[in-house]
Image (tube, grey):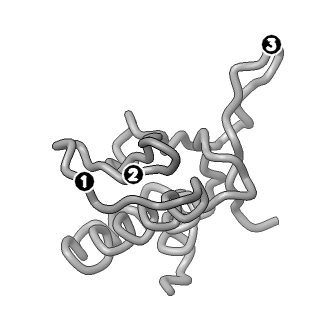
Amino acid sequence: MSPRRIQQRRTKGWRKPEGAVSVTRSSKHGNHYRVVPVGRGYAVKDHHDEDWGHYPTIREARARAVRLYRFDVTDIDQGNIPLIQEELSGKDLMCWCPLDQPCHADVLLELANGDPR
């Protein structure tokens, strides 16, 4: 079975699957672009609180945050790719994002397992 993204949970009885790696914002591989509600839409902000755009839906904002993360990892600092492959290849990755929404863990899965799109 190929590596997959798992949604972390805080529900009683939920346990981290054996061998899975957390890639939440507070981790080494976390996405520093975050989605925040603004008025009737959503904004994408970075760790310096710089604004990277406003979007009418959370899905569009999440997609933008993932594109920015992909750009940072693949275009700006390509030295990260061998490290990502070494640390995450073959492992399931966990994040808080809903599985039906864009998530930077999908980028990490592609890069770690040899499918950089």
Q: CA distance from mark 1 to mark 3?
A: 36 Å
57 relative to 117, above or below: above
The residue under label 3 is: 12
Marks 1 and 2 sit apart, C-alpha to C-alpha, by: 7 Å
Instruction: Please state the horizontal and vertical placement of residue 24, each as a whole percent of the image.
Output: 48, 40
Residue assigned mark 2: 43
**Which residue lies at the image location 73% right of the left edge and 53% below the top edge?**
99
Q: Secondary structure at mark 3?
A: loop
Image position of 113 (left or right of 8)? left
Residue holding disc 1:
51
Question: Mark 1 near mark 2, Cβ–Cβ under 8 Å?
Answer: yes
Residue shown at 66% from the left, 52% from the top: 92
Marks 3/2: CA–CA distance: 32 Å
Residue farthest toward the top in the current orientation of the protein: 12
The vertical placement of 106 against 7, above or below, is below
* The quarter of the displayed image where residue 39 is located: top left
Amino acid type indicated by mark 3: Lys
Residue 110 relative to residue 27: left or right: right
Mark 3 Cα-neighbour bin, 10 Å: few <14, some 14–19, many ≥20: few
